[in-house]
Image (spheres, helix red, strand yellow):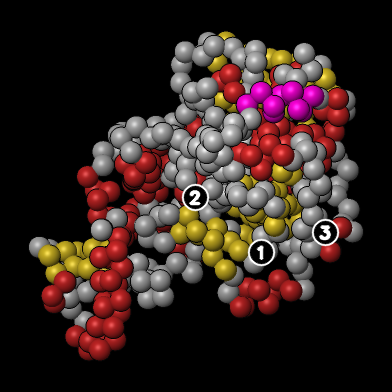
Amino acid sequence: MNSSLANLISNTCLQPFYFISSPGSLLWFAGKVRWQDFDQDLYVGATVVRPGQDPYARNKFNQVESDKLRMDRGVPDTRHDHCRHKQWKSELPASSVVITFHNEARSALLRTVVSVLKKSPPHLVKEIILVDDYSDNRKLLFDDYPSLSLCLRLMRSRVRGADAATAGVLTFLDSHCECNEHWLEPLLERVAEDKTRVVSPIIDVINMDNFQYVGASADLKGGFDWNLVFKWDYMTLEQRRARQGNPTAPIKTPMIAGGLFVMDKTYFELLGKYDMMMDVWGGENLEISFRVWQCGGSLEIIPCSRVGHVFRKQHPYTFPGGSGTVFARNTRRAAEVWMDEFKNFYYAAVPSARNVPYGNIQSRMEMKKRLGCQPFKWYLENVYPELRVPDHQDIAFGALQQGGNCLDTLGHFADGVVGVYECHNAGGNQVPFRAQVLLRSVTEVGLQTS
Ligand SMILES: [Mn+2]
């Protein structure tokens, strides 16, 4: 009995229970076992990787290494020294922690849950909600798992978890995380002060091969290029200098990585939750980031909050029609709703996206209007001035023209990523420079399309 995750509780939670979503029925499990008494060996031992099996096959990370770790293993306190002496407000709102999982390794999910229980002040975690995100082998996670007949996918699953939450603040976590010391208080404090803040911890790196916990740089913000793929941007020298005197100050970020953030529940609902017509994975962090900023909120990374996450190179998801198509469809929906005419730079960078049907966006457009959201131009000028907007000088010319389209550097002189953009005037007076840029870019195009 004490090896089933559904029975696991903290002896300290106010309302410790777990929720598993299934069609038409919401199943609540009252916890019965303190996490300290939980039989980890029995629970994790039931799904070990057998000799000869690929330890990466199920989860795309090394499950053998994950299974070896204790559920409450210590991780290095990666916070800045200044965070250790900080006092957090004693009156903070409690949060519902929503963890979505998909075919997760038992050991990884267990560590996520136990780290929440162990590293959070008990009165601040009202409940932990586990949402099954269409796992195809439920037996892997729960012995007494209820049978599901309806499939839920990530975005919709997260909304399902949020809908079930009974606390005023939502904390979304991925299912292969480990929370660090006092991770929750600084996040809740920012949201308690201003409900329109959507806040994220610094996401430390849990190595997918050996599960070492490594602190991430505090000088990063979330961003993207015109291909709309999330990336980390290193702060400018000026920004880093400005932070030196106050290393614990929140960092405004144009984009959140997506899986780990805290948001007021009422604000989440007011702002349109998630785009329910997005599928599986990808693009949802782009969409919620544009939406929060453009509709009056803000996104912050809180340096005194640290949560480790297993970054993987591949997804364990299966994508209907291929991952590229699903990603393009989701991204296109975000671009069509939020980017106004700037969406053309996305189509220039990823021409194939034009051929991917993106469905109906009418209700999202109506919501945008109803909320009185700012245009994308405002976002670029005020939130992400570091993103270079292509201008007529970036239009390629001559031999690289095809039909009405031209190869375009899209402003990416440094990393050489190029796209195709509608031809304008050829900028003849920069030929030697352009030629050099284009030469390097053509090599990259060759690599990308082969
Ligand atoms: Mn993840």
User: Of the residues tagged 3 and 2, which is closer to the observer?
Assistant: 2
Label disc, if present, on residue 114 of the rendered structure? none
Q: Please give the range of residues in magenta.
A: 39-47
Residue placed at 55% from the left, 58% from the top? 222
Label disc, if present, on residue 83 of the rendered structure? 3
Q: Which of marks 3 and 2 is nearer the N terminus?
A: 3
Label disc, if present, on residue 217 of the rendered structure? 1
Q: Earlier in the sequence, mark 1 or mark 3?
A: 3
Examine the rendered structure and indicate whether residue 322 appears above or below residue 162: below
Which quadrant: the C terminus? bottom left
Q: In this view, does 155 lie to the left or right of 131?
A: left
Label disc, if present, on residue 313 of the rendered structure? 2
Question: Disc 3 versus disc 2: distance between alpha carbons?
Answer: 31 Å
* Amino acid type, residue under disc 2 in the picture: Lys
Q: Determine crowd level at label 2: few under 14, some 14-19, many 20+ residues with C-alpha closer than 10 A.
A: few
Q: Determine crowd level at label 3: few under 14, some 14-19, many 20+ residues with C-alpha closer than 10 A.
A: some
Quick one: 65 or 341, which is closer to the camera?
65
Which quadrant: the N terminus? top right
Residue placed at 23% from the left, 63% from the top? 420
Magenta segment main secondary structure:
helix
Tag 2 and tag 1, C-beta contact below 8 Å: no
Residue 198, percent across and down? 63, 47
* Amino acid type, residue under disc 3 in the picture: Cys
User: Of the residues tagged 1 and 3, which is closer to the observer?
Assistant: 1
Image quadrant assignment for residue 439: bottom left
* Amino acid type, residue under disc 1 in the picture: Ser
Residue 275, percent across and down? 44, 35
Residue 350, percent across and down? 29, 55
Image quadrant assignment for residue 66: top right
Image quadrant assignment for residue 375: bottom left
Q: Is residue 178 left or right of residue 138?
A: right
